[in-house]
Image: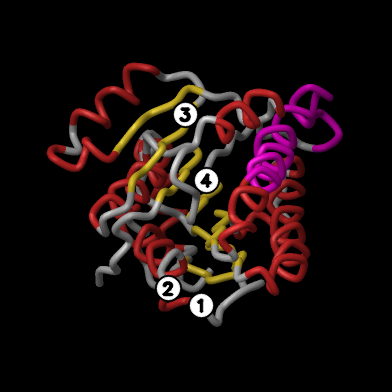
Amino acid sequence: MTHDLSGQTAVVTGGTRGIGAAISRALLADGARVLAIYARDDAAAHTFAASCGDAAARLSVHRVDISDGGAVQELFADLTGGLQIVVNNAGVRQDALVGMMPEDGWSRVLAVNLTGAFLVCKQAVRAMMPARYGRIINIVSPSGRGLAGQGNYAAAKAGLVALSRSLALEVATRGITVNCVMSGLVLTDLIRELPEEKLASLKASVPLQRFGEPDEIAAAVRFLASREASYITGTVLEVTGGL
């Protein structure tokens, strides 16, 4: 399934690795210009850009700490030609039981996964409102329902759903839609590196009995980013294999 995003500009946070890279590639395939944001890994970002072939002419990679409001504002100030699509995919995890969790482990996860998404959304709606059009898609997780050992990550993802629904109400009359895609257990480097016993246990927990692929998350994002999704806002599209 493809959609015509020619002439549109998209910002994808966490956009050079894993699910984010798949999303960036999908939007490029549909004709968009993509600004892929990453936090630290310069080598991975440049490897990703080199892998995009001819589409790399419409791709730029930017190292930005999205938890830094000034850095986010500077990124959006440099945009030219308008902004139509934003995907908040960046995230970090620092798992621990709540009773043993360091305060900085709580603060850092909330800063990137929730505050970072807020800062990007804030600048995005300001850029989109003059044209009365925009698509904001936030990547969330089943962990947002609550998961032992991930109190910080769960709180951030649950908060992002609530933020998305609130923002959807605020900007609906401006032609901007705000939705979430809930990503289940997806086969990325993080999953592949787990012991085989853990992999088998995780796979068995999925009703469809398999892990998802990054492209399956990207397919949901590319639809919600399209003009065809104009009557969908404030929703959570679950791509979880039934979790």
| Magenta stretch holds residue 232 | no
- Quarter of the rendering containing residue 176: bottom right
Viewer-side residue, 96 vs 235: 235
Q: Which residue is mark 2?
A: 227
Amino acid of disc 1: Ser
The residue at 78%/64% (across/down) is 166
Q: Which residue is mark 1?
A: 230
* Crowding at mark 2 (Cα within 10 Å: few <14, some 14-19, many 20+): some
The residue sitting at the left extreme is: 54
Viewer-side residue, 196 vs 15: 15
Amino acid of disc 4: Asn
Callout in the foreground (4, 1): 1
Q: CA distance from mark 3 to mark 4?
A: 10 Å
The residue at 60%/48% (across/down) is 127
The residue sitting at the bottom extreme is: 231
* Crowding at mark 4 (Cα within 10 Å: few <14, some 14-19, many 20+): many
Q: Quadrant of the N terminus?
A: bottom left
- Quarter of the rendering containing residue 68: top right
Whether pointer 2 and pointer 1 mark residues with C-beta atoms closer than 8 Å, the reply is yes
Q: Is residue 210 left or right of residue 113?
A: left
Q: Which stretch appears magenta? A: 98-123
Between disc 3 and disc 4, whose residue precedes?
3
Callout in the foreground (4, 2): 2
Viewer-side residue, 96 vs 47: 47
